[in-house]
Amino acid sequence: MKNPEWPLFVFPDDTSIEICESLEDARRDYEGIDVESGVFSFFDFSGYPLKPVFTIPNRHSKFLGLIRSCSSGVFEFARESSLLNDIDLALSNSEHLANTERFRTLDDVCDHLAERGHSMKLFRAKRQIKQEAEQPAHGDAEESE
């Protein structure tokens, strides 16, 4: 299985996208408990889906049978063989790019991924629909004059 190309695209289960520069950053910024439960989707810089592989599993314990505690394990990433986690779909559901020096806009991310061989048809179609909805209709411009 091929190692992921860094940095990673990280999609939390909201409408944002983040860039994670290194494995150390990923382990610091994303708790193993959340990674294991699927709160985040990860793709490498080429747009391939990644799965977390735990080298030290998350640990769940109870104290006196009442108080639960969890400690995060240690994980790394491997390329996922399944194409079900398509980066075009993930990016098309994103509305906000977290601060990064690599890309200024979501369109820049789309262009990067298209250069890496991804079609990005869904993202572009959604962007086109959004842009058309934001433009005033031709008749509206005439009425305001």
Image (cartoon, helix red, strand yellow):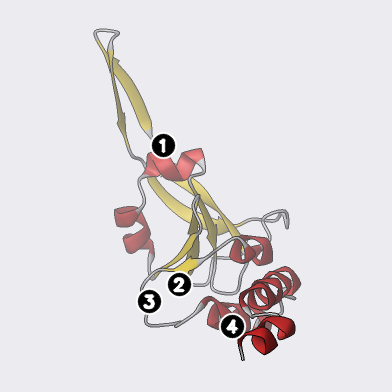
Q: Which mark is residue 112?
A: 4
Q: Residue at x 65, y 87 (%)?
A: 141
On the rendered image, what quadrant is the C terminus found in? bottom right
Task: Look at the image and tell me whether residue 56 can be seen.
Answer: no
Image vertical order of residue 50 relative to residue 91, above or below: above
Q: Nearer the viewer, residue 57 or 116?
A: 116
Q: Secondary structure at mark 4?
A: helix
Q: Nearer the viewer, residue 30 or 93?
A: 93
Of callouts 3 and 2, the N-terminal one: 2
Image position of 53 (left or right of 93): left
Total marks drawn?
A: 4
Q: Position of residue 90 (x, y in %)?
A: 61, 60
Q: Secondary structure at mark 2?
A: loop
Task: Look at the image and tell me whether residue 109 can be seen.
Answer: yes
The kind of residue on which mark 1 rests is: Pro
Of callouts 2 and 4, the N-terminal one: 2
Image position of 142 (left or right of 67): right
Of circles 3 and 2, the one toward us is 3
The kind of residue on which mark 2 rests is: Pro
Of callouts 4 and 3, the N-terminal one: 3
Q: Which mark is residue 7?
A: 2
Q: Residue at x 53, y 58 (%)?
A: 42
Q: Which mark is residue 57?
A: 1
Q: Position of residue 15 (x, y in %)?
A: 51, 58
Image vertical order of residue 18 relative to residue 77, above or below: below
Q: Residue at x 72, y 53 (%)?
A: 84
Image vertical order of residue 79 relative to residue 34, above or below: below
Q: CA distance from mark 1 to mark 4?
A: 34 Å
Q: Nearer the viewer, residue 5 or 49?
A: 49
Q: Position of residue 105 (x, y in %)?
A: 49, 80
Of callouts 1 and 3, the N-terminal one: 1
The kind of residue on which mark 4 rests is: His
